[in-house]
Image (tube, rainbow, N blue to C red):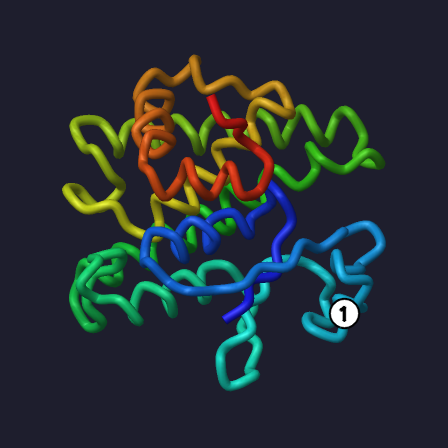
Amino acid sequence: MKLYYSPGACSLSPHIILNEGGFSFDKEKVDLASRKTETGADYTAVNPDGYVPALRLDDGQVLTEGPAIIQYLADRVPEKKLAPPMGTIERYRLMQWLNFISTELHKGFAPLFNPQAPEEWKAVATAQLARRLSSVSQQLEGKDWLLGNDFTVADAYLFTVLGWGRYVGIELERWPVLKAYQDRVFMRPAVQSTLKAEGLLRDS
C-alpha cells in the first residue's frame, strides 16, 4: 500500500492508523498548492479532487476520504481493536463520531485556514467550533477514548483535527479534558513515530 499525505493535514489520521496497525506501506508527500507529489508526479492522476489522503491498495485501486480509509485499515487488523466489529451498535457509534468530526469539526476549521475568508466569517466559525469542542469535552469526561476503553480510528481523527487549533488561535487549555485527551494520544508510540515521519516532531 501507499499513502499519499501532506504533513499535518487530515492524512495524519490514516498515517497514524497504518502505524498503529503494524502495516507495511510506502508513503509519498503531496504539495497541495501545486498538486504535485514529491517525485514530481501529477497528484490529480491519483485523486482528481487534489486533496489528501489517498491510499493506493496492493491491487492498484485507490481509496480516498479519511473516514473510509481508516475504517478499511481497521477492518484489516481486527485484533488491534481499532474499530468495533461491523454490525454492532458500537460500530455505529464509531461512525457517528467519524461523521461528527468530519462535518462539525474538520470542515469547521476550513474558513480559519482560508486567507480569503472575511474576518466576520472567521469569527462565526470560531464561535461554532468552540461550541462543538465544548460538546466533545463533555462527552469525553471520565473516559480515556471516544468509545471508552479502546483507542480507535476516531481518536486518531480527532487528535489530528484538534492539533489544528494552535495554528488558528483555538487553544485546548480552554478545555482541560480535551487537553488531557490530546496529551494521551500524543504519548502513544505509533503517534510519536508518525509525527516524526511527517517532520512534525523532532527526536529529543
Give the image quarter of residue 122.
Answer: top right
Q: Residue at x 60, y 36 (%)?
A: 199
Residue that carries the numbered disc 1 in the rendered image: 44
Instruction: Tell me where residue 79 appears, x and y as whole percent.
Output: 17, 63
Seen from the viewer's position, the closer of residues 125 and 17 is 17
Q: Residues within 10 Å of mark 1 (few under 14, many from 20)?
A: few
Instruction: Tell me where residue 38 appears, x and y as whole percent.
Output: 75, 56
Q: Amino acid at mark 1?
A: Thr
Q: Residue at x 77, y 25 (%)?
A: 119
Depicted 167 relative to depicted 188: above or below:
above
The secondary structure type at the circle numbered 1 is helix
Seen from the viewer's position, the closer of residues 110 and 161 is 161
Q: Residue at x 26, y 42 (%)?
A: 146
Depicted 71 relative to depicted 167: above or below:
below
Total labels: the figure holds 1
Q: Residue at x 76, y 62 (%)?
A: 39
